[in-house]
Amino acid sequence: MPKLMIVLGSVREGRIGLPIAEWVKRTAEADGRFEVDFADLAAIALPFMDEPNHPRLRRYTKRHTIEWSERVDAADAFLFAFPEYNYSYGPVIKNALDYLHAEWNRKPVGFVNWGGNSGGTRAQTALRPVVGALGLVMTTGNVEINVPQRQLSDGEFVPNEQQASVLKRQLDELLRLGEALRPLR
Ligand SMILES: Cc1cc2nc3c(=O)[nH]c(=O)nc-3n(C[C@H](O)[C@H](O)[C@H](O)COP(=O)(O)O)c2cc1C
């Protein structure tokens, strides 16, 4: 079974990102076609990228990098869940990406974004060249949520029909892209 890593890229106390990412996790697990790894960047707590060598060389010197490298290497596909901060992505997701190189290469990625004014569209648009530089291959039709706080019920994020169907399509696409890309890795 392919391994899907859900990367949660917001770490603030009281973040809405956690209930959103938990919805993504529940959905991916219920889907049954993936082994799911839930990578909460708050728990992983990488410092600002502090390796002396370019990640392309894969000569890592820090335990946190080696652990992150092994975990990402084991994944076959990714869903990045992160908010829009000041018309862009927050630093946490970029930092986690910058640590590694080949571990991301030729693997599919989908996005789940949210925002207050926007649905996180600008955050996602800003991250696209970054994931492109790393050889990740993006899905189309990503989840974008405007003011997700309105969809909380007892601390749980309750998707609307459109969000649920877009996420389902992303899982389909991640599976297909993953199969197509596997021989290139
Ligand atoms: C520092 C900061 C900057 C923000 N900038 C934007 C923005 O540019 N556009 C937007 O739609 N929402 C913006 N918001 C609102 C966030 O999308 C909203 O607070 C959301 O809850 C953040 O996700 P989180 O709770 O998982 O951290 C910003 C929030 C913060 C804390």
Image: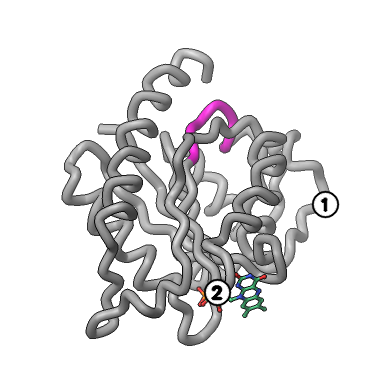
Q: CA distance from mark 2 to mark 1?
A: 37 Å
Q: In the image, is 137 to the left or to the right of 35?
A: right
Q: Which mark is residue 116?
A: 2
Residue 120, image quadrant: bottom right
For image coordinates 52% across by 62% down, the residue present is 119
Q: In the image, is 33 to the left or to the right of 139?
A: left
Q: Secondary structure at mark 2?
A: loop
For image coordinates 44% across by 59% down, the residue present is 39
Q: Which residue is mark 1?
A: 52
In this view, the residue farthest toward the top is 183
Q: Position of residue 122 (x, y in %)?
A: 65, 56
Q: Is residue 131 above or below residue 19?
A: above
Q: Position of residue 79 (x, y in %)?
A: 44, 48
Q: Is residue 14 above or below residue 167?
A: below
Kindly tell me whether mark 2's CB lies below 8 Å from ligand 1.
Answer: yes
Contact? badges 2 and 1 (CB < 8 Å): no
Q: Which residues are magenta?
A: 104-109
Ligand 1 image-quadrant field:
bottom right
Report the amino acid beneath label 2: Gly
Q: How is the image coloured?
A: one colour
Q: Position of residue 137 (x, y in %)?
A: 55, 31
Q: Is residue 81 above or below residue 78?
A: below
Q: Nearer the viewer, mark 2 or mark 1?
A: 2
Report the amino acid beneath label 1: Pro
For image coordinates 32% across by 65% down, the residue present is 22
